[in-house]
Image (tube, grey):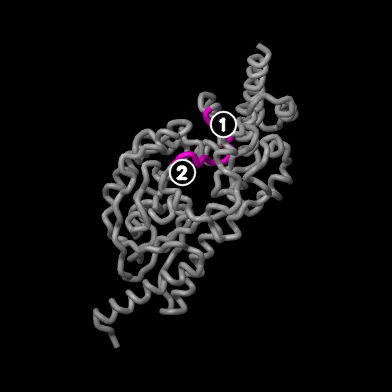
Amino acid sequence: MQKDTSTQLSDYTALADNIRFWSKSLGFHDTRIADVNADMSAVEAGLFAWLEQGYHGDMDYMAKHGTKRTRPTELEPQTQRIISVCMNYAPPAAKNSWDVIHSGNQAFISRYALGRDYHKVVRARLQQLADKITDAIGPFHYRVFSDSAPVMEVAWAQKSGLGWRGKHTLLLSRQAGSMFFLGEMYVDLPLPVDEVIGDYCGSCSRCIDICPTQAIIAPYRLDARRCISYLTIEFKGSIPEPLRPLIGNRIYGCDDCQLVCPWNKFAKITNENDFHVRHGLDDILLVELFGWDLQTFEAKLAGSAIRRIGYIQWLRNIAIGLGNAPYSIDIVRSLQARSDDSSALVREHVQWALRQQSKKTTIKEG
């Protein structure tokens, strides 16, 4: 027998409440729901303007899928709602980020990457959430994501009420700052939707002011071609020389804009063992990492998001860090040991680093 409208509404409201309860039990600290028909016109226009300016750099996949990012039904036609979730990642007992960044000799790795690859963890938990929904109501149409398909994650999280887009372009939450992963589930269920919240950045510009390469060219506008996260992770080629000194010892990602954000005083330490520090990567010397051979790189970074960039790019990034480090004979010897590396990309960055070290020797002697 067909249920009346009021009964259906009550059933879906109860289901939404259960989804939030199940999500929390699976490790998500917040869960909100957006209508697939939410107005994304401004977001879409902004995306295409950003692409037109070339701010995406070599990330061709950003332009490849057209409007699928902002129009979910072009990706999954049956979608009615988007369930957005977030999961804290700040690891316990990690060495203070600023202490590492200012040390010069240590390698700074973005705190989200100190543990296991979040893509797999978040998607697996979302699949478990989908299984719980199926157990409760029977088969339904869904698809889960975590930075894994043409989905405007931050925009849809904002539309769901999880938070607002900060001036650094990351999602911000009054309860959890920005140090969390996002995930989505597209569903064909007419669940009740949550309210969008306001923007609480106000007149603050700390994230813009702190950016080492001034990649945040305006509030809410990032030129990825200057962003250290893009340069050390997404970009595969030779890093422009003028930007190399600005990278410092950041060999995988950059957290500066998050570290100065006042809202991150509310960032929560993760309870997920998968996101805890592995292999001492929060407090490790550049020279030690540069000495890893391919087998060590693959073994120690198995299951890590870092492994995705590959060994050559890893060495390229560390070479820049060594070039920027205070002069040390150990650093010079470490670089010289790779001066005839089989990779032209590595050799180029090693030679640059050796020149930087040589300049410091001259200054020290003078």
Please state, as top left, top right, bottom left or bottom right, where the C terminus lies in the image.
top right
Quick one: SS at disc 2?
helix
- Residue labelled with disc 2: 258
Rendering quarter of residue 272: bottom right
Q: Residue furthest top?
A: 366
- Residue labelled with disc 1: 248
- Image spot of residue 21 (x, y percent): 43, 71
Q: Residue furthest left?
A: 5
The residue lying at 55 percent from left, 26 percent from top is 245
Mark 2 vs 1, N-terminal side:
1
The residue lying at 62 percent from left, 51 percent from top is 277
Q: In the image, what residue type sits under mark 2?
A: Gln
Please state, as top left, top right, bottom left or bottom right, where the N terminus lies in the image.
bottom left
Name the foreground residue: 196 vs 99: 99
- Packing grade of label 1 (10 A; few <14, some 14-19, many >=20) is many
- Find the distance from the CA under tag 2 to the CA under tag 1: 17 Å
Residue 244, compared with residue 24, is above or below; it is above
Inspect the magenta stretch and tell me whether residue 180 lies in it.
no
The residue lying at 46 percent from left, 62 percent from top is 29
- Image spot of residue 178 (x, y percent): 44, 50
- Image spot of residue 81 (x, y percent): 34, 65
Q: Is residue 42 left or right of residue 186?
A: left
Q: Which mark is residue 113?
A: none
Write down the region rendered in magenta. Answer: 246-260
| Comparing labels 2 and 1, the label whose residue is closer to the camera | 2
Rendering quarter of residue 45: top left
Q: Is residue 325 left or right of residue 54?
A: right
- Packing grade of label 2 (10 A; few <14, some 14-19, many >=20) is many
Inspect the magenta stretch and tell me whether residue 253 lies in it.
yes
Q: In the image, what residue type sits under mark 1?
A: Gly
